[in-house]
Amino acid sequence: MHAGKKMRLSCYLVYSLAGICFLFLTQGCGLVVRETQKGLIKVADSEIFWQGRHGKLTEQEMEWANIAWQYFINNYNAATGIVNGSNAFNIASVWNIADTVAATVAAHRLDLIDNYEFDHHITSLLTFLNSMPLSYGVLPNAFYNTANGKMTNIAGEEYSVGWSAIDIGRLLIWLNILGDYAPQYIEYIDKAILRWNFCKAINECGELSGINRHSSKNPPLESPKEPIGYYEYALMGYKAWGFSTPAPYRKKTPFINVYGIQLPTSKEDSRETGISDPLVSLPYLLLGLEFNWDRVDDHLSSDSYSSNSALADLAKRIYDVQEKRYQYERIFTARTSYRRSQAPYLVYNSIFSDGYTWNTLTPEGEQHADLSLVSNAAAFAMWALWKTSYTDGLMQLLNPLHDPEKGWFEGRRERDGGYERTMTCSTNAVILEVLAYKMYGKLYSNQVSAKSYADILMENEFDRPPCSPLDMKECRFKAGQK
């Protein structure tokens, strides 16, 4: 549905409501008017205009939002503006820095914080981004100490570990959303990003690359492959900042059949390469919450329509196969990667990996069926994006999985129904994103049209920093055809 049609329908609802109110109020039929108004609001929140769930948050949903924001209150570090990646542990990834931006914007939109607190949080974070040390002087380090802002590895040892082009992509998405939502910060957002040398993260054909040092004594190595979908998600961030990238959905990806549903798999057999490339839900769910499965340059279409229909269809299949598993096996399923507070610290809670469906494993390929999880992050996002009895059931199952004074847990174990009580920045940020999506629709809009600080700087080829989108050479092969 195009913007003009959406506007015409919206105006029709407004004028109809006004006319009915005048007619019945003049006749003293207030009760009829109120009921009619309720009906029109229900239509305005329906699938005519929106995918999934939409409308004002209920009392329970506001409680969910307050619980999620409590995590950020407890784990906030005023010196840097960064929130701990895991509860009470002073380390955060660049993905977690993006989580902090996402949660703060959502909290403000949901009236959990006022303008003063919003500005305080965002200013502290942008000040850090404009002064933080960069790995090898070129890009944000993979991890930072949230208390003092120093570069670390995931265990907190202080050294330059390298960077994740995937995590940087998520940060680009949320800095773009922040600039659109609060344009008074655009200058400082631009200045932070213009410090980065993008030639080390993305090439002229839109291929992403990162490096990782396993210890301070070892040389940097190419980062291991990210799970399927994260690459496509991160590309949206680079595209939003003007880089030419392959299409977010590539038709040559091989597929497997699960319950009669075609699902994407890695082009390489991980059983031969030794590198796991699992299919998980979260990147496709974030593409729905943040972009409505639209193209980055789509600023006009209604939220009831996805302009990247192939990507929307793929996300729907990823949802459908998990609902099918419940229908066939009566196993509640909402799968994505998650963090733990003890080894193994990262678990690929996959839909398909290494030749098996519903495979749960570590990044090194070690299987852990006992750690299979019904993920809060995945379940909340599925609930928002698909209004079904199955997602209602998921929320009933997971609603108790929180500490009202600390935040939401990672999820419930498939094996025995027990709680995975680890609390993370990412899961609580996703829950706040979900509730902002329910109230406002897709979170990315990019409606700012005035020239920004970066736009003006880019116009002068002598002043602009190296490796800007304008300096990228033309790709020698078609996207996805290499």
Image: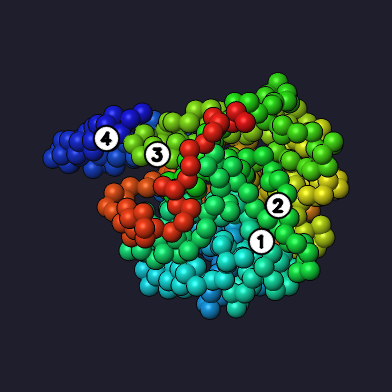
Kindly identify the residue that appears in the image at 79 percent across and 43 percent down. Answer: 275
Which element carries disc 4, helix, strand or loop?
A: helix
Q: Is residue 480 above or below residue 69?
A: above
N-terminal of the two: label 2 or label 4?
Answer: 4
* Mark 4: amino acid: Met
Question: Residue 164 placed where, x, y %?
Answer: 63, 55
Closer-to-camera residue (316/46): 316
What is the quadrant of residue 482 in the picture?
A: top right
The residue that label 1 is drawn on is: 162
To which residue does mark 4 refer?
7
Closer mark to the observer between disc 4 and disc 3: 3
Badge 4 or badge 1: first in the primary sequence: 4
- In which quadrant of the rendered image does the N terminus lie? top left
Q: CA distance from mark 3 to mark 2?
A: 30 Å
What percent of the width, then of the height, locates residue 85? 64, 64
User: Does the residue at mark 3 contact the one at mark 1 (Cβ under 8 Å)?
Assistant: no
Residue where numbered disc 2 is placed:
223
Tell me the distance, in whole angstroms, between the alpha carbons under discs 3 and 1: 31 Å
User: Which residue is at a point 41% across and 47% down the rendered structure image?
Assistant: 470
In the rendered structure, the answer to whether residue 270 lies left or right of residue 145 reads right
Q: Which residue is the site of mark 3?
A: 297
The picture quadrant where one finds residue 35 is: top left
Q: Give the class, few, some or many, for how many residues have Cα within 10 Å of label 2's Cα (few <14, many ≥20).
A: some
Label 4 and label 1: CA atoms lie apart by: 47 Å
